[in-house]
Image (tube, rainbow, N blue to C red):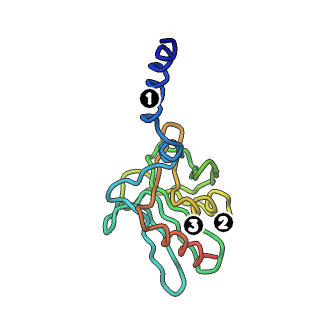
Amino acid sequence: MRPIIWLAPAAAALALSACAPTASHLTAATNGAPIPVVGYDWHLNADADEASLSYGMAETDDVPLDLSCRLGSGALQILQTVAEDHPRVIALESGGDTETYPAKAEPSAMHDGLDLTAVARTTDPVFLRFRKLGWLATYGPDYRTPLVAQQGSAPQIDRFFTLCG
C-alpha cells in the first residue's frame, strides 16, 4: 500500500509537466523581437544613383523614418519626423545596439512638427544589427517605437545595405 501513496503525486507532476511550455515556446515568446504592425513595412526604392529604405504605409505620407544613400558610398542620410519639442537627436536601437545621432531640425513640409536629419555609416553597429534582425526602433525620453519588417521583407533591407555599400 505504501507505493500507492507516492504514485498519485508523481502522476500529478507528470501531468503538469506535459502542460508546461517547451524550450522552443519559451524562446519564441521571450526573444525580445517586436511584432510587425499591420500595414507598415520597410519599402526599398532605388535608381542609378541613390537608394532609399522607408518605413511606413505604402503609397502614403505616413513615413516615420527614412534612410537614404548614394550607391556605394557607405554613408546614410536619416530622416525622422518628430514633434516640435523632441530633442534634436535621432536615437535608434536594434537588438540592444543603440546609436544617437546629432540632427538638424527643420519645420516639416508635410506634417506637424519637425523633420530631423542626420548622417550615419552603414557599418554602425545599430545598422549591422538591423540588417540581421529586420527591425529598428526609434526612441526618445518617453517613447520607443519599433519599426519591424513584415514577413518576407527582410531581403529589401539587405538589398538596401548592399546597394549603399
Label placed on residue 49: none
Write the residue at 33% across / 55% down.
Answer: 38
Write the residue at 44% across / 19% down.
Answer: 8
Write the residue at 50% across / 42% down.
Answer: 22
Which one is in front, 31 or 52? 31
Position of 21 compared to 131: left or right?
Answer: left
Q: Where is the C terminus found, in terms of image quarters?
A: bottom right
Determine which residue is flagged by label 2: 121
CA–CA distance in space, label 2 to label 3: 9 Å
Question: Which of the two discs, 1 and 3, labels the residue nearer the N terminus?
Answer: 1
Classify 10 Å Cα crowding around label 3: few (below 14), some (14-19), many (20 and above). some
Q: Nearer the viewer, mark 1 or mark 2?
A: 1
Q: Is residue 96 above or below residue 46?
A: above
Name the image quarter holding residue 12: top left
Q: Amino acid at mark 2?
A: Arg
Label placed on residue 77: 3
Write the residue at 64% across / 67% down.
Answer: 122
Question: Which of the two discs, 2 and 3, labels the residue nearer the N terminus?
Answer: 3
Q: Amino acid at mark 1?
A: Leu
Which one is in front, 63 or 82? 63
Q: Position of residue 153 (x, y in %)?
A: 44, 68
Which one is in front, 100 or 106? 100
Question: Which of the two discs, 1 and 2, labels the residue nearer the N terminus?
Answer: 1
- Describe the element under mark 1 as helix, strand or loop: helix
Q: Amino acid at mark 3?
A: Gln
Classify 10 Å Cα crowding around label 1: few (below 14), some (14-19), many (20 and above). few
Q: Position of residue 91 (x, y in %)?
A: 58, 50
- Describe the element under mark 3 as helix, strand or loop: strand
Determine which residue is flagged by label 1: 16
Q: Nearer the viewer, mark 2 or mark 3?
A: 2
- Describe the element under mark 2 as helix, strand or loop: strand
